[in-house]
Amino acid sequence: MTESISPGAFLERVDAHCFKQLDRAIALLWLVGRSNQTLGYSARDIARILREAGHPEQNVSRLDSALSADKRTAAAKAEGWALRPAARRELDSTFAPLLGPTSLPESDSVIPMALVKSTRGYIEKVGEQINKSYDGQLFDCCAVMCRRLLETLIIEVYEKNGRDVEIRNGRHYVGLSDLIVHLEKDSSIYLSKPAMTALKNFKNLGDLSAHNRHYNARHGDLEPQRTGIRLVVEELLYRAGLHPSAATTA
């Protein structure tokens, strides 16, 4: 199935690979012919797209002459220029990956990645997803993943202490509500009062995002809680022996 992307958005991704306007023109011909190889653009169309994407005004006649002389192009069925099949195949490996979703940069917007790096691969991955979903304004996703991280870390604490049987119901771990009740009553595994409050707040927020079909989390729901979740994550990492400082003191 052909990915749907506007020529302007495609050019933003192409700019890192193409340094000449003719190469950008060839990239646009590759894009327009994805679903039908007989389709193309005229030099005037390409000049307009480049201009709208923020590139300098093109000399249309010069661009048309350059496309005519390029061995990768042929006359399009309607008008303008299209890519020859062999040229398209050669360019597929360069441009096809640019049609996929782009990755958000790493950040510490909710969970400082330095806290979870080199802990467990699955913990690090969840921390990354929490930050990226927050940065991408996917706040329900962020809340649910925060809930998952907290549940995981409580289990890690009990496993580290050889007491995971206490939080199991047969072969399976109990849910987060029961984990919190058990942890709050456990005098040997201490969480500070602010951390316990944050744990409960994020459990409730995650529940709403996961289970209430009328609720959608917003920035204002998560923003006041960011300090709290950093605190509770750090304390649970300490109790689980996974905090970065544990490696330096071991």
Image (spheres, rainbow, N blue to C red):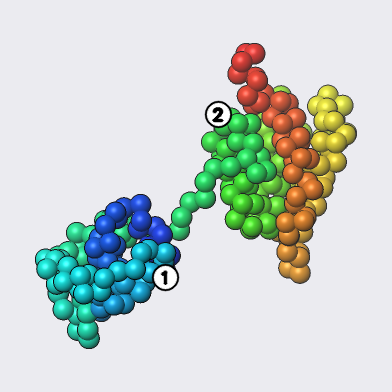
Q: How many marks?
A: 2
Which SS class for mark 2?
Answer: loop
Name the amino acid type tagged 1: Glu
> In what quadrant of the picture does the C terminus appear?
top right
The image shows residue 218 at horizontal and vertical percentages of 73, 59
Left or right: where 118 falls relative to 6? right
Report the front residue among 88 and 75.
75
Q: Nearer the viewer, mark 2 or mark 1?
A: 1
Separation (CA) of disc 2 from disc 1: 45 Å
The image shows residue 139 at horizontal and vertical percentages of 68, 57
Q: Residue at x 17, y 67 (%)?
A: 66
Residue behind mark 2: 118
Q: Residue at x 63, y 24 (%)?
A: 244
Query: Does residue 181 show up?
Result: no
Question: Dot 2, how many residues are within 10 Å of its Cα: few (below 14), some (14-19), or many (20+)?
Answer: some
Name the amino acid type tagged 2: Ser
Question: Dot 1, how many residues are within 10 Å of its Cα: few (below 14), some (14-19), or many (20+)?
Answer: few
Report the front residue among 59 and 9.
59
Q: Residue at x 73, y 64 (%)?
A: 216
Residue behind mark 1: 52
Report the front residue among 221 and 168.
221
Left or right: where 159 falls relative to 186? left
The image shows residue 118 at horizontal and vertical percentages of 55, 29
Look at the picture and state if 80 lies above or below 85: below
